[in-house]
Image: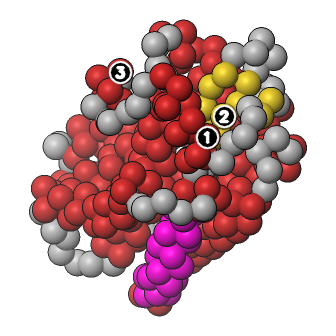
Amino acid sequence: MRKLLSAIPTRNGRDNFLQHDQINGDTSPILVVDTAFDLATIPVIGVLLLLSLISLSFIFHLRLRSRGACRLREFNNLWTIRVLLVFFISHWAINEIIRLPFFRRRYFFPFLPTLTLWQQDDLCKLHVVFSLGFTEPGFLIALFFLISESIKKQNRSEMRTFLWVLLMCLPTFILQTIVVFSIPQLPSMMTRSSFLSVDDGGNKSMTCTYPLLSSMVFGAFGVVYSVGLLISCWRVCSLVINKKMKLRIKVLGWTVMMSLLVESLLLLGVVGFGKPESMWYGGALLGMFVSVAVCGGVAEIVLVIKPIVEALVVAGDNNCQWNPVLRYLHPVEDRIT
């Protein structure tokens, strides 16, 4: 990590400190204390990571079972996209830990005591790029691909599908990288990815936030994505006969669109124009995080766990000892495709 941050050009001594003040617009450090909003984020991350671990267990269990069950091979064609979906969601959750001030001060900075304020600011920029430019758009694109491919009679090859999803993530990743690292000097409200803060002990550090310009870019992505997702969900619901599957797709679609709406409003509104020292600011960050976490959790349940459980039941896996929950599930009459 230190080598990665040191590769970015920096300034030394007093010029380094002044440059941070000029970039972030901070004339004095802001007192940052451990709030209930930050502490409440940890259990949400733990639940999401646990759900991701369960999803991976189901995916690879189905992968092993499909080798000896012909009825499962067709359903298992999209296993790589399901792995990508879980990968993006879990890495988004881990990346959000870096943003938490108390985690950075207590568990991260003690292992990297030589990080300068400039390098801490670069770390916050990396967080913004990976969060708004790669991991979150990545799991949204994988989600969209799983929904749209579910109604096709013939799916693409696994490697081609894998590369296609990654390729679709590149535009937002490149654009966020340009916005965060290469944009010309603009007002601090538009470009700052961190602000100078001080804890109760008087230790100064850079606390991560989201630049307004990056939030606007992500908001534009959310608008385009919501339109495409709405069309895809409408096509799936018009072709699927199973009422339960229709309901799941509708719930998933509305959850994703409401999550993007809440996140975009909080990013552009409170986070973009709010004061970092206010309680409303911490509440907005928590609300934004919870909205995305709920979206990721619902996606894993609807697109990974529930379909795999039903596929195993349909394939006659009721007596499987690997998961005792299956013995209480009744076989579904409709074949999962």
**Secondary structure, magenta segment, majority class:** helix
Q: Nearer the viewer, mark 1 or mark 2?
A: 1
249 sits to left or right of 76? right
Viewer-closest of 30 and 69: 30
Residue 57, placed above or below residue 150: above
Residue 130 forms part of the magenta stretch: no
Viewer-closest of 228 and 183: 183
Residue 97, placed above or below residue 328: above
Amino acid carrying label 1: it is: Asp
Q: Quadrant of the N terminus?
A: top left
Image coordinates of residue 206 in percent, x first then y, are: 60, 32
**Disc 2 designates what residue?**
196
Amino acid carrying label 2: it is: Leu
Please give the name of the residue rendered at 81% of the width and 17% of the height, measured from the top-left corner. Answer: 200
Compute the Cα span from label 1 to label 2: 8 Å
19 sits to left or right of 273? left
* Element on which disc 1 rests: helix
**Disc 3 designates what residue?**
2
